[in-house]
Image (cartoon, grey):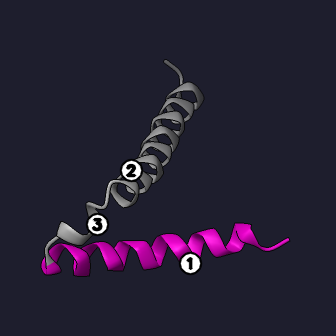
Amino acid sequence: MDRNAAQETILAETYETFRTGIYELGELKRNGRLEVISDEDVMEASKHMKTIMEIMEKYGKE
Protein backbone atom coordinates (compact mmCIF):
# COMPACT_ATOMS: atom_id res chain seq x y z
CA MET A 1 0.00 0.00 0.00
CA ASP A 2 1.50 3.34 -0.95
CA ARG A 3 1.75 6.22 1.50
CA ASN A 4 -1.29 8.14 0.15
CA ALA A 5 -3.50 5.08 0.32
CA ALA A 6 -2.35 4.39 3.88
CA GLN A 7 -3.12 7.97 4.90
CA GLU A 8 -6.56 7.77 3.28
CA THR A 9 -7.26 4.55 5.17
CA ILE A 10 -6.25 6.16 8.47
CA LEU A 11 -8.41 9.20 7.72
CA ALA A 12 -11.41 7.00 6.86
CA GLU A 13 -10.99 5.01 10.07
CA THR A 14 -10.61 8.20 12.11
CA TYR A 15 -13.72 9.73 10.55
CA GLU A 16 -15.70 6.56 11.32
CA THR A 17 -14.55 6.66 14.96
CA PHE A 18 -15.61 10.32 15.19
CA ARG A 19 -18.99 9.65 13.58
CA THR A 20 -19.65 6.62 15.77
CA GLY A 21 -18.70 8.61 18.89
CA ILE A 22 -21.21 11.33 18.05
CA TYR A 23 -23.90 8.67 17.55
CA GLU A 24 -23.04 6.91 20.82
CA LEU A 25 -23.12 10.20 22.73
CA GLY A 26 -26.59 10.86 21.34
CA GLU A 27 -27.66 7.38 22.43
CA LEU A 28 -26.35 7.98 25.96
CA LYS A 29 -28.38 11.18 26.13
CA ARG A 30 -31.48 9.63 24.58
CA ASN A 31 -31.39 6.70 26.99
CA GLY A 32 -30.87 8.91 30.04
CA ARG A 33 -27.53 7.31 30.83
CA LEU A 34 -25.53 10.54 31.00
CA GLU A 35 -26.65 11.00 34.60
CA VAL A 36 -24.94 7.80 35.76
CA ILE A 37 -21.44 8.78 34.59
CA SER A 38 -19.09 9.23 37.54
CA ASP A 39 -17.91 12.71 38.52
CA GLU A 40 -14.34 11.76 37.63
CA ASP A 41 -15.34 10.60 34.16
CA VAL A 42 -17.49 13.69 33.61
CA MET A 43 -14.49 15.89 34.43
CA GLU A 44 -12.27 13.97 32.01
CA ALA A 45 -14.87 13.89 29.24
CA SER A 46 -15.53 17.60 29.71
CA LYS A 47 -11.91 18.41 28.83
CA HIS A 48 -12.22 16.47 25.59
CA MET A 49 -15.66 17.90 24.82
CA LYS A 50 -14.34 21.45 25.20
CA THR A 51 -11.67 20.72 22.61
CA ILE A 52 -14.21 19.11 20.26
CA MET A 53 -16.55 22.08 20.58
CA GLU A 54 -13.72 24.52 19.80
CA ILE A 55 -13.05 22.59 16.59
CA MET A 56 -16.75 22.38 15.71
CA GLU A 57 -17.19 26.15 16.17
CA LYS A 58 -14.95 26.64 13.11
CA TYR A 59 -17.46 24.75 10.98
CA GLY A 60 -20.68 26.03 12.51
CA LYS A 61 -20.22 29.56 11.26
CA GLU A 62 -21.64 30.38 7.87
Q: In the rendered structure, which disc, 1 or 3, sits on the residue that comes first in sequence?
A: 3
* Badge 3 element: helix
Q: Can you name the residue that lies furthest to the right here?
A: 62
Q: Nearer the viewer, residue 51 or 26?
A: 26
Indicate the amino acid at tag 1.
Glu
Picture quadrant where residue 13 is located: top left
Picture quadrant where residue 50 is located: bottom left
As drawn, is 35 to the left or to the right of 49?
left
Indicate the amino acid at tag 3.
Leu
Q: Which residue is mark 3?
A: 34
Task: Report, in whole angstroms, how far the alpha carbon at label 2 lies from the one at label 3.
Answer: 9 Å
Residue 41 included in the magenta stretch of the image: yes
Indicate the amino acid at tag 2.
Glu
As drawn, is 55 to the left or to the right of 25?
right
* Dots 2, 1 in contact, CB < 8 A: no
* Badge 1 element: helix
The residue that appears at 38% across and 61% down in the rendered structure is: 29
* Badge 2 element: helix
* Dots 1, 3 in contact, CB < 8 A: no
Question: What is the span of residues highlighted in magenta in the rendered image?
Answer: 39-62
Q: Which residue is mark 2?
A: 27
* Main secondary structure along the magenta-highlighted residues: helix
Q: Which mark is residue 54?
A: 1
